[in-house]
Amino acid sequence: MSGVRPTTDSGTGPGDTTGTHGGRSGVPARSRGAIALVEANCTVCMLCARECPDWCIHIESHTETLPQPGRARDRRQPVLDRFAIDYGQCLYCGICVEVCPFDALHWAETHDYPGTGGAGGLGATSELVAERDDLTASVAAVPPPPPLDDGAEPPPERTGPRSQKVSGGTSGRPSTLFGRT
């Protein structure tokens, strides 16, 4: 057996997926996890579904009309009815997470996928679709963002209402273009 390195009896060899890797039991160190949905952030813009190379994201929605007293027109708001990811087709490329402009999709460090099937594995393929409830339950496993770099502006959530705009700049920063020679 040249070129093949068998695993040890303890199950912690190179091909092991049952040992502990990086503090996560049964998961290879480089795996990304599952995709979590923050439903409150989803605006049903469909960018994630359109940019997905496998078309594994399924979104259904409808539009509700909200009356606006004192206004000429009522407001129309999209409402999310169904958001599902078919993990049988998903490449785990992360394009959907990157393209979402409202941070509704995140990588979660959970690996509890649907599709376990019965004792003999029957029905596993049909169960690989994670519906909205499964995806929103994974939000608790989303790790916090890394700390900001030194000298970075604090996020708007921590500064309260936006400060007054300084002439020529954005987000309260003075413009550096006018100081150049």
Image: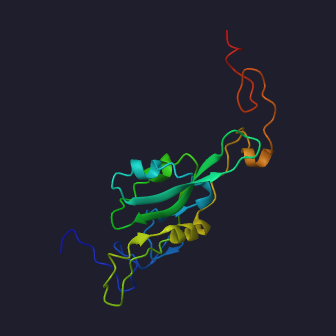
> Horizontally, is 152 left or right of 82 in the view?
right
Relative depth, front residue between 14 and 17: 17
Q: Return the x and y of residue 143 as percentages of the image width and height.
A: 60, 62
Furthest toward the left, the residue is 1
Locate the C terminus and report the quarter of the image it occupies.
Answer: top right
In this orientation, does residue 146 appear?
no
Residue under the image location 55 percent in, 69 percent down: 138
Give the percent coordinates (x, y) of residue 4.
Answer: 23, 71
Rendered location of residue 135, percent (x, y)? 52, 67
**Residue sitting farthest toward the bottom:** 119
Which quadrant holds residue 64? bottom right
**Quadrant in the picture for residue 149:** top right
| Residue 129 showing in the rendered view | yes
What residue lies at 66% left-to-right and 41% top-to-bottom? 73
In the depicted view, which residue is nearer to us: 145 or 130? 130
Total marks shown come to: 0
| 155 shown above or below 80 | above
Q: Nearer the viewer, residue 64 or 154?
A: 64
**Which image quarter is the N terminus in?**
bottom left
Counting from the top left corner in percent of width and height, residue 13 is at 37, 76
Up-down: is 24 above or below 66? below
Please tell me whether residue 179 is drawn above or below residue 55 in the rendered image. Answer: above
Q: Is 59 positioned to the left or the right of 166 in the image?
A: left
Q: Residue at x 67, y 17 (%)?
A: 177
Question: In the picture provided, is 53 more to the left or to the right than 68?
Answer: left
Residue name at image x 44 percent, y 78 percent? 19
Residue projecting furthest to the top: 181
Task: Tell me which colouring the rendered structure shows.
Answer: rainbow
The image quadrant of residue 92 is: bottom left
